[in-house]
Image: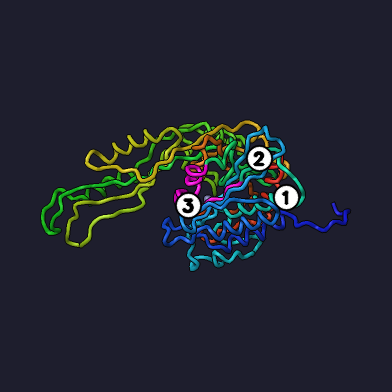
Amino acid sequence: MTSDAAPARPDPTDEVVDLCRDLLRIDTTNTGDNDTSAGERRAAEYVAERLAEVGVEAELLESAPGRANLVARIPGTDPGRDALLVHGHLDVVPADPDEWSVHPFSGEIRDGYLWGRGAIDMKDFDAMVLAVVRGWQRAGVRPARDIVLAFTADEEAGSDYGAHFLARRHRHLFDGCTEAIGEVGGFSYSVDEQRRLYLIETAEKGIDWLRLHAKGRPGHGSMVHDDNAVTALAEAVARIGRHRFPVVLTDTVRAFLAEVAEVLDIEIDPDDPETAIAKLGPIANIIGATIRNTANPTRLGAGYKDNVIPGRATATIDCRSLPGQSELLERQLRELVGPDIAIEYIQRQPALETTFDGDLVEAMSAALRAEDPGARPVPYMLSGGTDAKAFSQLGIRCFGFAPLRLPADLNFSGLFHGIDERVPLDGLQFGVRVLDRFLRDC
Ligand SMILES: [Zn+2]
């Protein structure tokens, strides 16, 4: 397409690099505390301006000062079709410049990568979506169905100021949306030179964060004392931390393992899937967490003086439940901690699981195969949680599909919230091409 003399339009696959770099340079650190978080306002305004430049009007919605979300709707050509929600969060987790090879908010390009906090989680996808939409608007392309874009705040601290706020207070903006795509899916895992699995998120574990409270008799540290809250709490925490919950393979994990067995030509023992999962290298720690409930102690609190036995002690446990297992996990935990320790839920969000079928899945798969003939799309379960939890409460069927083709030797899962987070430039551009195909006619 070099023949016409019309002025050259920016190519979305070039533009995505600039858009992503600009977003990385806007500090949107989310500490989980409004007083110390940078807020998403500047990033949301940046996105709104880039959309306005091409004639897309967006609504900016603040949940608290500086905590900004952005929603826009691109009308489709077929009003009879249900809408598709495309969502990406604008906040990032903190980054300590002293630990990084480049400044985490510099958006530096080095060795074929764009570096910065948020490069894969998830300003990469935000930039891809922007690049595709800007490309369409300039070329006069309209998608088949309405596409609702949501750029959210606060995903990294539970989404209260972001997706949950939108779902609670502005649900009309999502009228007609029946399906959604968002983060942590669509990335490649290389089997060999020719073949790559693309992991599409069809399920995610539930969030069950709880606080244990032990009570005892306060007293002097020098005396005989048989009712010590710290001792009781420590025993309970140790029992939980060392416990291995039973393996339960849900449909998604079963389907994923079947694909893995086939492409790697290995047998997977359903009673011991871990041996096979260990062979998956960089994604083993994501997949390994999706075959059972997990409970990791993360915080401890007790006491105020070295020689005073406190009357209370607390611990936080980060538990993640498989679909349909939250109540079972609660019973298992109660049994582990015993009758004298109280359990308080500080965050409880259900797991999600949908099937790997239907037109939308076909469209994702076709777009991936068109751009990578060695692509083999597979369903998988994410061990963490995303904004999908909030949007699924509106009855929307959510997938993780932020396509990225990755080099075989990149430790992708290690980059999430990790030091030297970075995205390969060609992977980013691949993502734009896949999304463009997918969103046009899904
Ligand atoms: Zn994320």
- Please name the amino acid that badge 1 sits on: Gln
Q: Taking 233 as reference, is 281 left or right?
A: right
**Front-lying residue, 411 or 66:** 66
Compared to 280, does 91 lie above or below? Answer: below
Q: How far apart are the two marked residues, 2 and 3, measured between alpha carbons?
A: 25 Å
Sequence order check, earlier mark of 2 and 1:
1
Quadrant of res 397: top right
**Front-lying residue, 271 or 206:** 206
Residue segment shown in magenta: 149-170
Does 158 appear in magenta?
A: yes
- Please tell me whether mark 3 sits on a helix, a strand or a loop: strand
- Write the residue at 52% across / 44% down: 170
Counting from the top left corner in percent of width and height, residue 105 is at 55, 65
Camera sees residue 396: yes
Badge 2 crowding class, 10 Å Cα cut-off, few under 14, some 14 to 19, many 20 or more, is: many
Q: How far apart are the two marked residues, 2 and 1, measured between alpha carbons?
A: 14 Å
Q: Are marks 3 and 1 in contact (CB under 8 Å)?
A: no
- Please name the amino acid that badge 2 sits on: Asp
- Please tell me whether mark 1 sits on a helix, a strand or a loop: helix
Residue labelled with disc 2? 146
**Front-lying residue, 190 or 166:** 166
Q: Are marks 2 and 3 in contact (CB under 8 Å)?
A: no
Residue labelled with disc 1? 137
Counting from the top left corner in percent of width and height, residue 394 is at 51, 37
Q: Which mark is residue 28?
A: none
